Amino acid sequence: MTAALLAAMSTAAAVWLWTGPDLAMARLRVLTSAERAWPWPSLRRYVVRPNPTRRADAWRRATIELCQSLAAELTAGRTPGEALTRAVAAVDFPDPETLRPLVAAAKDGGDVSAALRAVAPAQGGEGLCRLAASWDIGVTAGAGLSALVERIGRTLRAAQAHRQDVAAQLAGPRATARMLAALPALGLLMAGALGMRPLHFLCGSLPGFACLVAGLALDACGLWWTHRMALHAQAS
């Protein structure tokens, strides 16, 4: 009776995974609802563990918005320093406090390209480094800064779209890897329901404990290896 109940539950779970909502969209809804659930962003900053990948993606999106706003300000006829100051103020960066040296350099006529490279984070700051290079070319060589910024914005948007497409394609393999990693636990439950006492063997004897350690190690290595392959695919 218990085995039949477990079989029915497993079948229902498989049907739900096959016909249920898209995993990527479900994860997106969870993330957005988690953002809205925190009324105090300062408190959330200390409670929620930061995600480097998500933070790098936020910096990339903010850089794209910065390029769009800066190109619009330059097209309107403003000076590069004033245009950059207004563009930075119009964009919601992940950490606005780090951009104060950049704003000061833009207002006081300092080295803006060096300030852009200084405020660029290690992950997600490649767009700011490209913007710094275009600033050097546009200001020192006299090239059209607005056209350069627009070209950088198009390049960054294309790269961001490619990363999102790769992330969407990797959502299925990642979910499959997690489900396969959880299958041994289901096997233990089914074996216990059949009266085989798997925990007694795994925890009560030396060969069983060796099998338990080896299984957990191989399971963890599989998850780690899948994660590394996904990161490599996203970085390429």
Image (cartoon, rainbow, N blue to C red):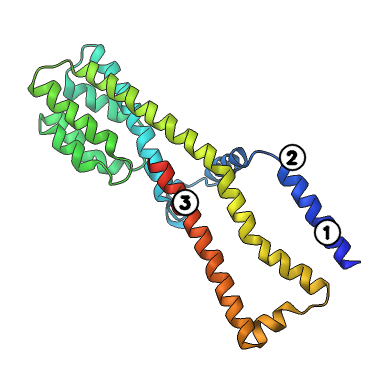
Query: 10 Å neighbourhood of mark 2: few (<14), some, or many (≥20)?
Result: few
Q: Which residue is mark 2?
A: 19
Residue 210, above or below 31? below
The answer to whether 127 appears left or right of 166 in the picture is left
When asked about the image quadrant of residue 218, the answer is bottom right
The mark closer to the camera, 2 or 3, is 2
The answer to whether 30 appears left or right of 9 in the picture is left
State the residue lying farthest toward the top. 76
Q: Quadrant of the C terminus?
A: top left
The answer to whether 207 appears left or right of 122 in the picture is right
Q: Residue at x 23, y 27 (%)?
A: 85
Q: Secondary structure at mark 1?
A: helix
Q: Which residue is mark 3?
A: 44
Residue 3, above or below 174? below
Q: Which mark is residue 151?
A: none
Query: Callout 1, which amino acid?
Result: Ala
Q: Which residue is mark 1?
A: 7
Residue 50, above or below 32? below
The mark closer to the camera, 3 or 1, is 1
Q: Residue at x 80, y 50 (%)?
A: 12
Query: Callout 2, which amino acid?
Result: Thr
Query: Percent from the top left, x then y, of residue 228?
Result: 44, 53
Query: Percent from the top left, x then y, of residue 123?
Result: 32, 45
Return the disc, 3 or 1, that comes first in the chain's sequence.
Answer: 1
- The alpha-carbon separation of the residues under discs 2 and 3 comes to 34 Å
Q: Quadrant of the N terminus?
A: bottom right
Q: Secondary structure at mark 2?
A: helix
Q: Residue at x 17, y 21 (%)?
A: 80
Query: Callout 3, which amino acid?
Result: Arg
